[in-house]
Image: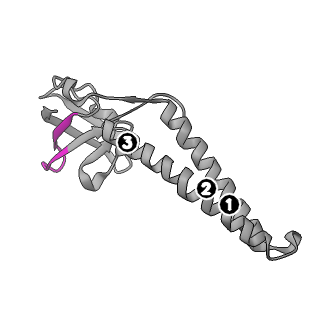
Amino acid sequence: MSGIQYVTKETLEQMKTELQRMKAVDRPAASKAIAEAREKGDLKENAEYDAAKEAQGILEAKIAAFEGSLANIRVLDESSIDTSKVSILTKVTLTNLNTKKQVTYKIVSEQEADLKAGKISVTSPIGKGILGKQVGETAEVKAPAGILTFKIVEITA
């Protein structure tokens, strides 16, 4: 993951908590699993030892990636969001002009995206397509299902 990532303070805290858990709980557990496997004899033919070492390697890679992500994070202040146009952390009500259905999404970073909770990533096809649009404007979005046309109905914080 490279480049600056914008997240809310809440997401930053969740990420820090996850990193702390990996370092304080998962890392010692991986070391313990290696030690237990090592006690079982010949390391050349010990599949349990190999699996424990591989799991430790994967965990260390995850920790390094997490630390890299945290270094590139910028926290957004939700109270200073410009609602004159669609931007990250705005809540947008759209009308799908193809189906005439209305949907409301909150535009968030990739880490916070959760379609079931109505949060879409700023880098998703819809997120990219409506970014910078104002109320009343239409946006054509190239999605896997084809071209979707949305009208911006409302933008709130």
Q: Position of residue 65 (x, y in %)?
A: 57, 42
Comparing labels 1 and 3, the label whose residue is closer to the camera: 1
Q: CA distance from mark 1 to mark 2?
A: 6 Å
Q: Which mark is residue 31?
A: 1
Place of residue 71 in the rendered image (x, y in percent of width and height, measured from the top left): 51, 31
Q: Earlier in the sequence, mark 1 or mark 3?
A: 3
Q: Is residue 86 above or below residue 66?
A: above
82 up-or-down from 22: above or below: above
Report helix, strand or loop for mark 1.
helix
Mark 3 and mark 2 residues within 8 Å of each other at the beta carbon: no
Could you tell me how far apart the alpha carbons at marks 1 and 3 are, in whole angstroms?
A: 26 Å
Q: Which residues are magenta?
A: 90-104
CA separation in Å, label 3 and label 2: 20 Å
Q: Could you tell me how many numbered marks the image carries? A: 3
The mark found on residue 13 in the picture is 3
Q: Which residue is mark 2?
A: 27
Question: Residue 128: horizontal and vertical position, in percent?
Answer: 34, 34
**Three-letter residue code for mark 1:** Ser
Query: Which quadrant of the figure contains the C terminus?
Result: top left
